[in-house]
Amino acid sequence: MHAHGNESDHGRRPTAKSAERVTPQLPPLETLQGSAGNAAVTEMISRAGDSRSVQRTAARPLASARATGRRGAPRMPPPRTRRKTSSKAAANKLFAKQVMEKLKAEGWTADGSHEVWARMKFHKVGPHDAAPPKKYKSGDAGYKDNPGNTIAPASFADKRDKQAMRWVSTAVMEYLKLLGKNAIEIQAAVHEGTLYLSANSKDALGTLQSQANGKTGKAFLTEVTAKVREKDGFDDRSVDDRLARHTRKTDERLIGATGSEGNYSNVIDALGKPVMVVVDGGDGFHAERRIVGHLTKQAEGKAEKDAKTAGTPYTPGSIPQVVPDSLAGTKRPCVSCYLKLFQGKEGINPGPHWMSSAANQEMPGYDDKDIARFVKYLTDGISNTYATLVWECDDANHEITFTGKVTTEYGSDSNTDEEGDTLTVPPSEVPTVGEDAG
């Protein structure tokens, strides 16, 4: 409150506190006018105003100090700041939006939003040359409407090493999950007598490497399956049936094999040697590309050494990339992995395309945001993407029943049960399906 005319500060030394409140007082206007005249009154009022201005200005530093926490002064809230979107993030969102628009025009279906561009995925389902292309709300809706884009259980009679790697990958994925690590994906391969394992997540790879370090494949997988079997409900198969089936097959046909003869001899022999965990590449780099890159680098090193020994010139990059026939894992290859590793290989069908930077390393046009080049690379190389038919098995009759669901979270299964008996699909259950080796 300001001081009123009936309260005098005369004779009192003003303090810093009172300086802010006290205003110089003037006599009543009529008295001034009668004794001093209008001109003098105007000058006196002006001086009083100047005095008030000076006093308030002098008081401001004190008020500012009191705002920091002295009693009696209000605390001022911190200024509100807006979260700024970085130019890089804005460029990624714009690029994802433009790619989405281009791919949709080519008949692709998008899941997700360019606002969260790293989680977007794209599907190509239906006739490649459909005009106009049919539009779907989601990838799953497209797969359900196009049986030719879904894969049923397939025979692995001539792909036993690949089949075994799928079992191993499923068990290792769950093992890491039980240790609190999300691997995102596990891939495995047997190459030149060694078992290779890798994951997408660097965090999970660190755990995998530390757990497997110095152990043979057999010793490590024994720990893996023992841990998975501890999961609640495993014995009564209330856990995912695919997990139970793959874990048991790893135990019984690989770890528990009495000799190295038979369908899985290459894998059984490799389990007697130290397991190799491949960590090459950054976080999120897809597991199968880590393994292929590692093996190719090894082959190039050997070729260069041999050339030096022979005294012949060596051209870097002259060795074709090494892609083991046994390479397999928890998921079918995405579009990027398919184009980089498996393009043109019979019986391998790609899953969806992921928009993340980790999935698109070394993809033409991606890093430099060349939309036309990037989209052309995808559409030229991919006519369709595929999903897995989700099924159930009647153990008594060895019959498959399809659930009407599809998934892109894992590759298609074998058409044999745990005992190796061939599963049959009743005529009423036969879908129009492609062929799959993954």
Image: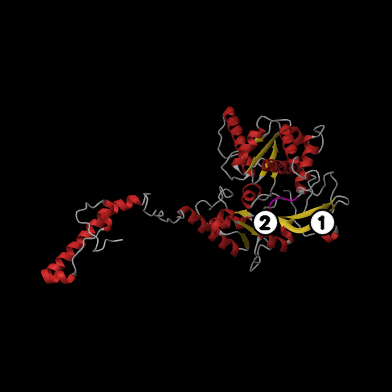
Observer-nearest of 124 and 325: 124
The residues bearing labels 2 and 1 have C-alpha atoms spaced at a distance of 23 Å
Residue 211 percent across, percent down from the top left: 66, 34
**Numbered circle sitting on residue 306:** none
Q: Residue furthest front?
A: 6
Q: Amino acid at mark 1?
A: Thr
Q: Residue furthest right?
A: 397
Question: Residue beneath label 2, please?
Answer: 385
Observer-nearest of 42 and 415: 42
The earlier-in-sequence mark between 2 and 1 is: 2
SS assignment for the magenta stretch, majority: loop
Residue contact at pointers 2 and 1, CB within 8 angstroms: no
Work out whether 398 lies above or below 134. above
Observer-nearest of 101 and 208: 208
Residue 316 percent across, percent down from the top left: 55, 38
Which corner quadrant holds the N terminus? bottom left
Residue 234 is drawn in which quadrant?
top right
In this orientation, does residue 161 appear? Answer: no
What secondary structure is found at the residue carrying circle 1? strand
Q: Amino acid at mark 2?
A: Thr
Residue 114 is drawn in which quadrant?
bottom right
Residue stretch in magenta: 408-412
**In the image, what residue occupies the spot 76% across and 57% down?**
433
Q: Is residue 67 magenta?
A: no
Is residue 357 found left or right of 44 in the rendered image?
A: right
In this orientation, does residue 194 appear? Answer: yes
Is residue 262 found left or right of 51 in the rendered image?
A: right
**Numbered circle sitting on residue 401:** 1
Residue 242 percent across, percent down from the top left: 76, 48
